[in-house]
Image (cartoon, grey):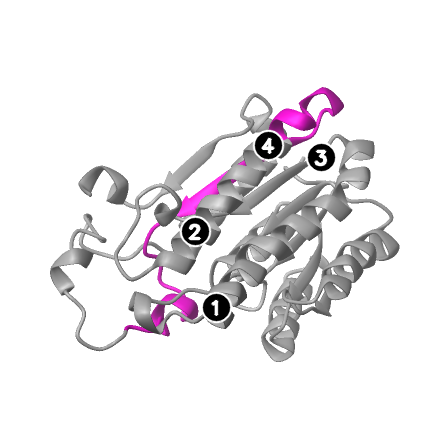
């Protein structure tokens, strides 16, 4: 029997990178997957791959900065598949800014996309997860614990993701709902490839971000998510799990 036979998973950020790899992996393991992303074309491409492989999914376009859109995504999963067992919040943004150029609008955008959308989706999903004894896997970052220069907004948002996930793990453990955090380091994704770097930064402050001499692969992260979201990880709750090539220990 596959790990997620007869289970339903919601994956945000499913159009590319780690979200796409996670959606493909969960579908391959038998899950019916609701795909959420603002990139409609990319999201539909992921759905086509799942369909071609014999999986079951539905793609929904959603805007992480809009509360109604986040709510609709959760309701869409339940309306489509009748239940919800796994929530994986991958959607996010990243970028480096000198403090003086980090406007309030930019800071708030990081918090809205990386943190607030995660909070809303988890809150809306919780009544359904309690019914199925399901679980949550939220994406934070290596930088949720190891702070990096020029990433004030990003680090703040990801540290907060870790915090709210651990709070939920404690609050709902008696209901049989687990919540854990995946903390990737540098992974080969379109987001990482497009990360903004400001001018005149001190590159020395960004050393040792790839201690294995390479970036990680999205599939390596997806493998961890599949384990954490499965019953094989039933005794793991409220944890930060790092998949960073040893990045945290090297800093």
**Image spot of residue 187 (x, y percent):** 35, 57
Q: Which residue was labeled with disc 4?
A: 167
Which label was assigned to residue 156? 2
- Residue 241 shown in magenta: no
Q: Which residue was labeled with disc 3?
A: 134
Q: Is residue 105 left or right of residue 187?
A: right
Classify the position of the N terminus by image quarter.
top right
Residue 31 visible? The answer is no
* Cα–Cα span, label 2 and label 3: 28 Å
Q: Which residue was labeled with disc 1?
A: 104
**Total marks placed:** 4
* Cα–Cα span, label 1 and label 2: 13 Å
Residue interval drawn in magenta = 169-197
**Helix, strand or loop at mark 4:** helix
Q: Residue furthest left?
A: 204
Q: Is residue 111 above or below residue 6?
A: below
Residues at discs 3 and 1 in contact (Cβ within 8 Å): no
Q: Is residue 251 above or below residue 49?
A: above
- Residue 183 shown in magenta: yes
Residue sitting at x 71%, y 35%: 134
**Helix, strand or loop at mark 2:** helix
Q: Earlier in the sequence, mark 2 or mark 4?
A: 2
Q: Earlier in the sequence, mark 3 or mark 1?
A: 1
Residues at discs 4 and 1 in contact (Cβ within 8 Å): no
């Amino acid at each position: 029997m596959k790990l997620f036979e007869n289970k339903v998973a919601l994956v945000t950020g499913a159009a590319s990178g780690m979200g796409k790899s996670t959606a493909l992996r969960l579908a391959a393991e038998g899950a019916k997957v609701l795909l959420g992303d603002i990139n409609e074309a990319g999201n539909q491409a992921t759905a086509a791959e799942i369909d071609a492989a014999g999986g079951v999914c539905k793609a929904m376009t959603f805007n992480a900065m809009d509360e109604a859109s986040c709510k609709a995504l959760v309701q869409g999963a339940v309306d489509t598949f009748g239940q919800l067992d796994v929530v994986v919040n991958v959607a996010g943004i990243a970028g480096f800014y000198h403090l003086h150029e980090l406007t309030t609008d930019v800071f708030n955008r990081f918090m809205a996309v990386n943190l607030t959308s995660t909070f809303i989706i988890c809150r809306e999903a919780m009544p359904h997860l309690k019914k199925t004894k399901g679980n949550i896997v939220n994406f934070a970052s290596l930088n949720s614990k190891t702070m990096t220069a020029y990433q004030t907004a990003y680090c703040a948002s990801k540290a907060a993701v870790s915090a709210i996930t651990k709070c939920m793990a404690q609050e709902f453990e008696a209901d049989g709902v687990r919540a854990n955090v995946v903390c990737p380091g540098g992974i080969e994704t379109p987001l990482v490839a497009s990360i903004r770097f400001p001018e005149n930064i001190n590159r020395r402050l960004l050393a040792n971000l790839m201690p294995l001499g390479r970036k990680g692969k999205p599939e390596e992260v997806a493998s961890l998510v599949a384990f954490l979201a499965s019953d094989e990880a039933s005794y793991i709750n409220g944890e930060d799990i790092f998949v960073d090539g040893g990045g945290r220990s090297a800093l």
